[in-house]
Image: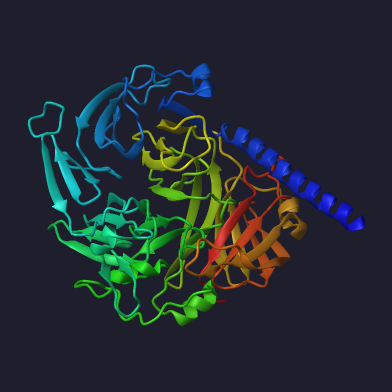
Amino acid sequence: MVSQQIRIRSVLLVVLTIVSCLMVRSECADRESDYYRLITIAASESPTASRSKQWKPAPDGLALEVSGLEVMDDQRVAVAIRKGEVWILDGVYEDPPADVKYTRFATALHEPLGLLKDGDALYTAQRSELTRIRDSDQDGVADEYISVARGWGVTGHYHEYAYGPKKDRNGNLWITLNIGLGLRGAQLQRTIREPGLGYRQGRWRGWGMKVTPAGDLIPVCAGMRSPSGIGMNAAGDMFYTDQQGNWVATNSLHHMREGAFFHHAEALASMNLPGSPVRGVKSVPGGLPYPEAMARFSQLKPPAIWFPYKKAGQSATDILLDSSGGEFGPFSGQLFVGEFTQASIHRVFLEQVNGEYQGACFPFRSRFASAVLRLAQGTDGSVFVGLTNRGWSSLGTASYGLQRLVWTGLTPFEMKEIRALPHGFRVVFTKPVDPQSAADPDSWRLASHTYLYHATYGSDEIQKAGLKVTKVEVAEDGRSADLHVEGLRQLFVHEIAAPGVRSLDSQPLLHNTGWYTLNQIPAE
């Protein structure tokens, strides 16, 4: 009887905890709109959306499942859709957008999953090639489709997506290629096999590739599972996002560079192809905590950012650098990462320590109408958000659409940055803090964890431990606080929560938790 009562109390405690978390998230989401306002340009119809919409629906029969998004000028954006078309939308900056004009620009594409304007052309990665699309006679409709690059394998498996392109500072165009999952039958006939490790995949599946201005297709890095986001940071380096699955513990952000191998072992099927910069992998360890796997597997590179599962999204997508110079709020120079399942956006601060990228991720904005797949910054600093949830479910009131996120001019009280120190972390705020609350170690809650590196799907947080804050030093201007922390662990994720910290005007943080991926601990 006693044990049954204990079980009942335990269940009630779990239920109350879930309800409490949902209430906190809901309250936080309501406050987010005070600082970043959502404007719907187009969306699929739903009972919730139709009651309050201030926009006109897209033309009959047009499912605006946004798979690529590019800003054209101060009136128009270009949108690729899953059906295989590109549309030009005019009037998208209006508020409300009551008279958006739609022009079909290109057709007959095979699942375009990106869009880039370069000169007078648009580029998109189709399933089997990178294509340049032009309107040579200037009548508003594309009449020239040119294959710029091809050469990766396509077996026919549904999961063999190709993403991009994005352009780097040297004019190269970057694309990323999904792994095929559970290949069989006729699909296996079209694969290559790494004889020593036994992995089989289509050519270059799970790789990051670049196309030079001369048109050369060059393999750069490997080990990707579902790399649906590509982007450049303020320093000009290229990154991609990956999504939890086999070999991938949780969602992640990686620095793409020559010869790097990340996590998905089946990409090594292409290791011995001519031009491969990844060589010499004799074995792949499995079932080990990540720090131990890295010690045994010299080619394995850690992500710059781990996004703890469900706490910081469930399926990371596009990468956007805020290059607005402050027109989008106080986070200029940082990255924003789309989130599919939770229909939201997360924010990322990056730094380099001992030559290795690392940093923190934070919640940013939730409650988009559907899954966030594509991001593009407008000429006024606002952010266009392309939505589609086909194939996987997401939160939201719609199945697809286009929204615009606009800064209201009010600055939220947030942890703007978290920086690694030899003895702990420096937390930088968007507004001055109340020094008494910030200096109190009891205002902070810290913990760390890592993940398992293995072939099965995802990983729980393992080797979890609470961390003690021994001292907090608040800067004279109140803009930062240095935390002295016992028990820092290299290659672990460090959760940094500040539920007790208040601003000078007694406001709590809009989002009081960040997660820092500590690849390197700075020297004294």
Displayed quadrant of residue 108: top left
- Quadrant of the image occupied by residue 266: bottom left
Looking at the image, the residue that sits furthest to the left is 137
Residue 307 rendering spot, x and y as whole percentages? 53, 56
Residue found at x 49% / y 19%: 50
In the rendered image, the vertical position of residue 111 relative to residue 417, given as above or below = above
Question: Is 457 or 177 nearer to us in this picture?
Answer: 457
Which quadrant would the C terminus be assigned to in this image? bottom right
Where residue 248 sits: x, y (%)? 47, 62
Q: Looking at the image, can residue 8 be seen? A: yes
Quarter occupied by residue 135: top left
Camera-nearest residue between 274 and 421: 274
| Furthest residue in direction front, as rendered | 185
Residue drawn 38% across and 45% down?
323
152 left or right of 54 in image: left
In which quadrant will I find the N terminus?
A: bottom right
